[in-house]
Image (cartoon, rainbow, N blue to C red):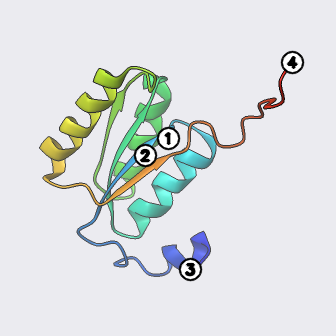
Amino acid sequence: MDDQSIEQAPGLLSEKVALLIGASRGIGARTARVLARAGAKVMLAARDEKALEAVVGVIQAEGHEAHFMSLDVGDERSVECLVDATLGAFGRLDIALITHLMGERRNLSPT
């Protein structure tokens, strides 16, 4: 199912809660908008608080529920706080996506 199909089924994710790490731009931001348009309540996270605020503003302007929290994904306590904040804001967590490394190229061969 592509994002246009999801957007044409606005209640598909009704009452679901999605947590997206790496949602301040690119694939993560687009995914957050698509999930919200499909009815999910979304919690967005990344390091760039200003960018997150802008993405959440767009989602909220479309009439969807969204929150954000800046975090360092390498800090375990920060991630725990994010999950706690998501549960506190929405009472549940149904979908969790980490998109912050999508598209990043790394050399995996030994040097």
Q: Are marks 1 and 2 in contact (CB under 8 Å)?
A: yes
Percent position of residue 54, x then y: 46, 35
The numbered mark, 2 or 4, whose residue comes first in the sequence reads 2
Identify the residue under disc 3. 5
C-alpha span from label 2 to label 4: 33 Å
Residue 28 lies left or right of residue 40; in this view the side is right
Q: Does 82 sit above or below residue 77?
A: below
Is disc 1 surrounded by few (<14), some (14 to 19) or many (20+) residues within 10 Å? Answer: many
Callout 1 amino acid: Ala
In this rendering, which labeled residue sits more in front, label 4 or label 3? 4
Identify the residue under disc 1. 23
Image quarter in which the N terminus is found:
bottom right
The numbered mark, 4 or 1, whose residue comes first in the sequence reads 1
The label number, if any, that marks residue 111 in the structure image: 4
In this rendering, which labeled residue sits more in front, label 4 or label 1? 4
Point out the residue furthest to the front here: 110
Q: Are marks 4 and 3 in contact (CB under 8 Å)?
A: no
The numbered mark, 4 or 3, whose residue comes first in the sequence reads 3
Which of the 4 quarters of the picture holds residue 40? bottom left
Identify the residue under disc 2. 20
In this rendering, which labeled residue sits more in front, label 2 or label 4? 4
